[in-house]
Image (cartoon, rainbow, N blue to C red):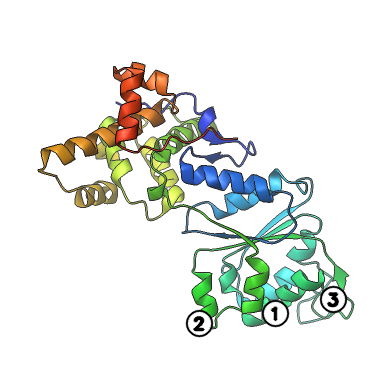
Amino acid sequence: MINVEGDHGKRVCSLSDDFKMVGNSPPMQKVFKFIHKVKNINAPVFISGESGTGKELVARNIHLIGDRREENFVALNCGAIPENLLESELFGYTKGSFTGALRDRRGLIEAADKGSLFLDEICDLSFMLQSKLLRVLQEKELRRIGENKSRHVDIKVISATNKNIDKEVEKGRFREDLYYRLKIISVELPSLKDRGCDILCLLEYFVQRFSRDMRLKKLSFSSKAVDFLLNYSWPGNVRELKNEVLRCMVLCQESEVISEKDLSKKIVGDAEKTSPVSYDFFSARAEFEKKYLNQALARFNYNQTQTAEEIGISRQGLFKLIRKHQIDIPRKPF
């Protein structure tokens, strides 16, 4: 069995106690470095990536370790609010400006003054609101609905989308001038299937978190269950993995181990479908060696001396296998 309990501190980019980012893979190391590079830059930041990869988490950490951390972090999903309400939600309004406007109300942009404004699913903004947002970025001011005077705002704008914004511009669905204003500094978040053995780190982290926050018994995943999890394609990315761990822990409280039988049927079915048996002995052995070494290195936090000792080979032998299979050894999180 591979026990996902234990010390996971070195695999967590602990930028905040409440919003930890977990991962030790090279793609995630690049994301961590990006966060530190842009934390105090006042230019807009653009985050792209599939749904469930943690775009808001990255945005929050940029804010929380930056020089605006004492001010508000305001988040809005542009696709979650009807268009006729979104303008007043963003820009606010004055009393009597429309039916139901019984008092003056500031919008989310003003609420983020001196802090950070995170606009998720930015491609869902209407052309009219794109134009108004462009003015905020250019002039650093806004007008509430029904108001004649302009109000100065100082905000760090972080925007995100899971759509291909370049294609949205090409098809005329997103303003090109706003595109160039928003995408000054950008990062693309890796999907979970491209993060290698980060899955093991995330399993460990979620087990610890759910056992602490929900007072659930700590459980371990069997080796076979871990194999299925590693081979699954994870279309829902980290969010899907988080939900799967929680489901398994809740339903398996009377057990000591979460086995492959406890996993969702789609995970077992997808792994079996995408992992055909190889009948070439040498390629099958090489594939097994690489997968085994990746799991072992991740399990012991990429400590090569400890890994070699635990799996029963010399340190020099481990080095040779790492070179042979071209295994990436990530640097320690900053």
Q: Which image quarter holds the C terminus?
A: top right
| Residue 29 marker | none
Drawn side of residue 266 relative to residue 61, left or right: left
Q: Position of residue 263 (x, y in %)?
A: 30, 42
Image point (48%, 37%), residue name: 24
Using a 10 Å C-alpha cutoff, classify the residue at mark 3 as few (fewer than 14 neighbours), some (14 to 19) or many (20 or more): some
Among the two numbered marks 3 and 2 on one chain, the one whose residue lies closer to the N terminus: 3
Give the label on residue 131, or none: 1
* Crowdedness near tag 2: few (<14), some (14–19) or many (≥20) residues, C-alpha within 10 Å: few
Q: Secondary structure at mark 2?
A: loop
How many residues crowd mark 1 within 10 Å: few (<14), some (14–19), many (20+)?
some
From the top left corner, tell me how far across and down residue 116 is, in percent. Answer: 73, 56
Does 256 appear above or below 195? above
Residue 2 visible to an observer of this rendering: no
**Nearer to the camera, 212 or 150:** 150
Q: Indicate which disc residue 95 carries.
A: 3
Taking the view exactly as shown, the residue that stands out farthest to the left is: 279
Is 109 on the left or on the right of 125, as rendered? Answer: right
Q: Secondary structure at mark 3?
A: loop
Q: Nearer the viewer, mark 3 or mark 1?
A: 1
> Gap in Å between the C-alphas at discs 3 and 2?
39 Å
Cα–Cα gap, marks 3 and 1: 24 Å
- Which quadrant is home to the N terminus? top left
Query: Who's the residue at 68% across and 70% down the image?
Result: 181
Tell which of 258 and 289 is nearer to you: 289
> Which three-letter amino acid code belongs to the residue tagged 3?
Lys
The amino acid on which the numbered mark 1 sits, given as a three-letter code, is Ser
